[in-house]
Image (cartoon, rainbow, N blue to C red):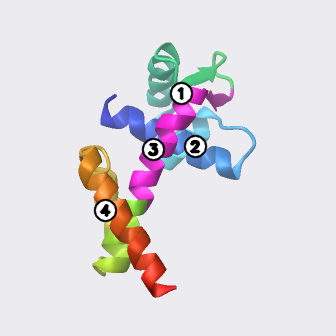
Amino acid sequence: MQKSGEDYLEAVLAISQDKKKVRTTDVALRLGVSKPSVNRAMKVLSADGYVNQETYGDIELTEKGRLKASQVYFRHKTLTSFLHDTLGVDLKIAEQDACLIEHDISSETMEKLASFMRSEQERNS
């Protein structure tokens, strides 16, 4: 899956945690893209089995979509926390950098980073 697809899934997941219904407008506002861009992305994600959406209706993650979005969201939050809390990077910059890194980081590095962060949290508790 391409970076943009992961970003759309992550956005749908985040919005669904705050609102009952996820609309094209919500996703467009969150990602700073046009509604037609969201509609095109949702068609691709729907064809690949990641989302369900009636024509211009509410967007829902499928089980496959929720799993993928959760993985991306976990990487994003872990990386943001590491950059901000551990390295002292400004939060806004940490968020932006995490978004760039989350799509390319290897599974091995991500697992080791998550393990490191858990150890740090336990040590500081």
Left or right of residue 51: residue 83: left
In space, the residues marked 4 and 2 are separated at their CA atoms by 23 Å
Could you tell me how many numbered marks the image carries? Answer: 4
Q: Are marks 2 and 1 in contact (CB under 8 Å)?
A: no
Give the labeled residue for mark 3.
71
Q: Badge 1: how crowded within 10 Å, few (<14), some, or many (20+)? A: few
Residue labelled with disc 2: 13
Residue count near mark 4 (Cα–Cα under 10 Å), binned few <14, some 14–19, many ≥20: some
Principal SS element in the magenta part?
helix
Q: Nearer the viewer, mark 4 or mark 3?
A: 4
Quick check: 74 above or below 20?
Answer: below
Q: Estimate how packed mark 3 is, as few (under 14), some (14 to 19) or many (20 or more) residues with alpha carbons within 10 Å.
A: some
Amino acid type at circle 4 is: Leu
64 and 3: which is toward the camera? 64
Q: Of helix, strand and loop, which one carries label 1? A: helix
Name the spot of residue 92 as percent of width and height, x first: 37, 69
* Span of residues in magenta: 58-77
- Residue at 33%, 54% (x, y): give it: 111
Q: Earlier in the sequence, mark 4 or mark 2?
A: 2
Of discs 4 and 1, which sits in the foreground?
4
